Every structure is written in structure tokens, then in C-alpha cells.
Amino acid sequence: MSKIFKAIGHLFENIGHFIDKKIILPITKFFVGISNKFKKNGKSFEKILTKKPGLIIVSLVVAIGAFLIADSRTTSLIETSAEVLYNQPISATYNEEAYVVEGLPETVDITLIGRRSDVYLAKQLPANDITVDLTGLEPGVHEVNLNYKKALSSVEYKLDPSVATIVIYEKVSQEKELNYEVINKDKIDSKLMVEDVSLSTDQVYIKGKEATLNEVASVKALIDLENLANPEVGTQELKNVKLVAYDSKGKKVNVEIVPSNVTATVKIASPQKEVPIRVIPENYDDIVFGKAISNITTDVTNVTIYGSEKDLEDITYIPVYVDVSDLSEDKKYSITIKKPSGVRAMSADSVNVTVSLGNETTKEFNNIYLEYENLANGLVVQAVEQNSTTVTVSVKGVQNVLSNMDATTIKAYVDLEGLGVGEHEVPILVEGQDLRAKYSSLTTRVTLRISEQN
């Protein structure tokens, strides 16, 4: 009742403000204006007001004006009007443990129809819930009426919609294995990573209608790294971790999950490995004639890389590619280091490379054994000619590089990928560990015979 009285008081307060603004203030301004207009003839105007007939006429005019204004306001207050309250929530009463209800709208719109003053008052009153009582209804299709308790009997209320067609299903449950998914990985330092997560339970129950439960392919706990209080190496606990059910296509499925959340223990680690930088010249053959690379230096020789232990295991160096085409004198390059696949962070992201040139000489290395790569399983290979098992390799570079070069650092090979039984003529490829030199085989191609293994 106190809220109703407050609303009524608020209404009369607004009416008082209206009269003060629309009646008292305009009349005051009116007389001030007349006074200013007849300022020179003030005595004549004063005489009119002091005489009884003049005073009666002025009072009559003021009274008629006040009546017209008040009558207009009163008419507006008693006129019929309509207001719409949008998106009013619905509450349903039924056994939520035993049944699932579909088809019931979450909200309705309420139209208030009545006198303007009543509608205004009704809008100030707290809205009552729209209710629907489903108690006693069995599984199946039902048409139910939505009910609304009127705040004022003088106002007509219309609901849209006022009737809902619903379907009631028996609620069933299934046990599901609980997995986890780590989200917002970019919210923590890139040098850190989640090494392991343990959940307070690995089994949950999903509840709903049977057809919906059959859509659920997985239930996951969403480990949101943004919720970590202080991400650092060690173990942290996350409480109230949200659980979500997904179908086979990764789309969320609306089912009840018991429990609705879990506690997760998150182990943060920072696996790292230090590896050297390896500068690889590109387009070496395009260096100006008669010149070769005498030295390659970098201002950063090693970098620390971060990632999972599995990803870091096979990384032995970080390649940095330098285009030396048309190089005719010593040159300094500033190169951005590209992160290899699986590397989350590096201790350096750029390197300065200085390439020095010298006069080119040539040296030959004999009896380099020919190796075979990518031969398919179940096959064997042999050279058609007896003398095709070794080759002579020509190496071009500056004198101090070639004089210190060992033949064991040179590899000659053929790539047999995709080749089957029969004779094949394939190119000979050569590479060496010292990238300051250029390598080539004096024998460019070799004929090999591939046969099935006995």
C-alpha cells in the first residue's frame, strides 16, 4: 500500500508543478508585461484596478483563463489512453525435476488501456509476474493461458501473446565424460602455457528430453585463462568453471548439466630451449661473378624459444634467410626472425646479419658416396653402372673456407620419392654444412634400377 500512496503523491506533485508552470507563472508574466507596456501611463492603469468595475473585469478574465487551463488539464487526465509494457518475463510452475517444457515464450508484451491518470499510475506500480500453472499436466501438447494479476482494476490489461501452445516431455538423464578446453590463451604471457588441467570430477550428468540428449557429443569445462588471478609458472585453482555441452559439429546444446560447474587445478609451465641461429643465403649463384661469401656474422647467435616440449624437441636451429642476389660488396642486413611452427615466443625477434665477400676459388672432393633418399618400402635400388656409386663434388668459395673444409661435411644424394620398379635417370643433389660455399656434382645425373625386395 505504501508504494500506491507514493505513486498517488507523485501524481499530485506533478499536477502541482504543472499548475505552477502553466498557470501561475504565465499570469505573473502577463501582468508584468502589462505593467511594462503601460509604464508611462501607470497612474491610469492603477486607477482602473482601484475602481470596482475594473477590478471585477480583470478578476473575471483571470478566472476564465484559469478555468480553461484547468479544464484542459482535467480533460487530458480523464481521456482514454493506452501504453505498452514490452518484454515482461513469464514464470511457469511445474515439476522441473521430472519434466521439460518447450514452446513457452520467455516474455510477453502487456497493453494497458484506461484513463490517462490511471494508466500513468499503473506504470509506476511494480509489475507483477505473468504466470502459467502447468501443475498436473501430463507429457504431450497443451494450450495454456497466460495470467496476469492486475495492479489496478480500473485499467484493462491485454497480453500478447495471451495463449501459448507448449510441449511437455519427460526429463531423462545420461552420464557423460567431462573433458576440458582452454580458452583465451592469448590473455597470458606467450612464454607461458597450460601444461596440465585436473578437474574436481571427470563425470557429469546431462538432463533434458531424450532427443536432445542424443545430440550431445561432448561436455567440456571451459578453462578461461583470463580468470587466472596471477598467471605464472606453478599451480593455480579456478573455481566455478563453466560447463558446456556440444554436438558433433561443435554447436552448443541446451541441456541441464549436473553439477553445473566444477573446480579446476591448472598447471602453468614455461618449456624453453636455447638453439643457434643459422643464416641461410638465398640466390647464392646470383652473387657478382668472381666473388664468394667469406664470412657471415650476426649480433645474435642463439635464441631461447618457448612452446610445448613436443614442439621444441625437433627444433635444432632457427633458420634466417638472407637474399644475396647481386651482392658485390660487404653488406649488413636487418632480418625479422620468423617463429617456427609450434614456437609461442622467442627471446629475440630480429637479427642483424653481416655478409662479407672475398675472391672465389674452387676445390674438388672425390669419392663422395651417393646416398638414396625417400625410397618406398619394399623396394631396393642400385646403380646401373658400377662407377655410379660415388661422385666428385666441386665446391666454390673463398680460400680460407675451402682449405678448412672436410669431405665428411659434404652430402651427395638422389631423391627417389614417388619412383617405382624400373630404371630411372635422376638428378644428383649436393649440400654441405658450411653455407658460405656453393656445392655441385661434376656428374649431374645418374641412372638407377629399382626393384622389389626379395
Image: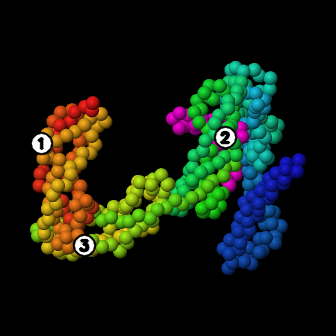
Task: Look at 62% across and 25% down and name the residue there.
Answer: 211
- Label 1: which secondary element: loop
For label 2, count other residues whose C-alpha is less than 10 Å away and answer few (under 14), some (14-19) or many (20+): some
Which is closer to the viewer, label 3 or label 1?
A: 1
Mark sitting earlier along the chain (1/2): 2
Q: Which residues are magenta?
A: 237-259
Q: Disc 1 marks which residue? A: 385
Rendered position, 230 above or below 257: below
Task: Look at 33% across and 64% down and name the residue there.
Answer: 278
Q: Residue 202, labelled with which disc?
A: 2
For label 1, count other residues whose C-alpha is less than 10 Å away and answer few (under 14), some (14-19) or many (20+): few
Q: Disc 3 marks which residue? A: 295
Q: Residue 374, labelled with which disc?
A: none
Which is closer to the viewer, label 3 or label 2?
A: 3
Indicate the position of residue 99 as horizontal and vertical percent values: 73, 27
110 is within the stretch colored magenta = no
Q: Does 180 sit left or right of 42 as displayed?
A: left
Q: Mark 1 belongs to which amino acid?
A: Glu
Q: Are marks 3 and 2 in contact (CB under 8 Å)?
A: no
User: Of residues 379 and 398, which is closer to you in this image?
Assistant: 379
243 is within the stretch colored magenta = yes
Residue 339's quadrant in the figure?
Answer: bottom left
Task: Look at 69% across and 42% down and name the residue there.
Answer: 201
Mark sitting earlier along the chain (3/2): 2
> CA–CA distance between discs 3 and 2?
59 Å
Q: Mark 2 belongs to which amino acid?
A: Asp
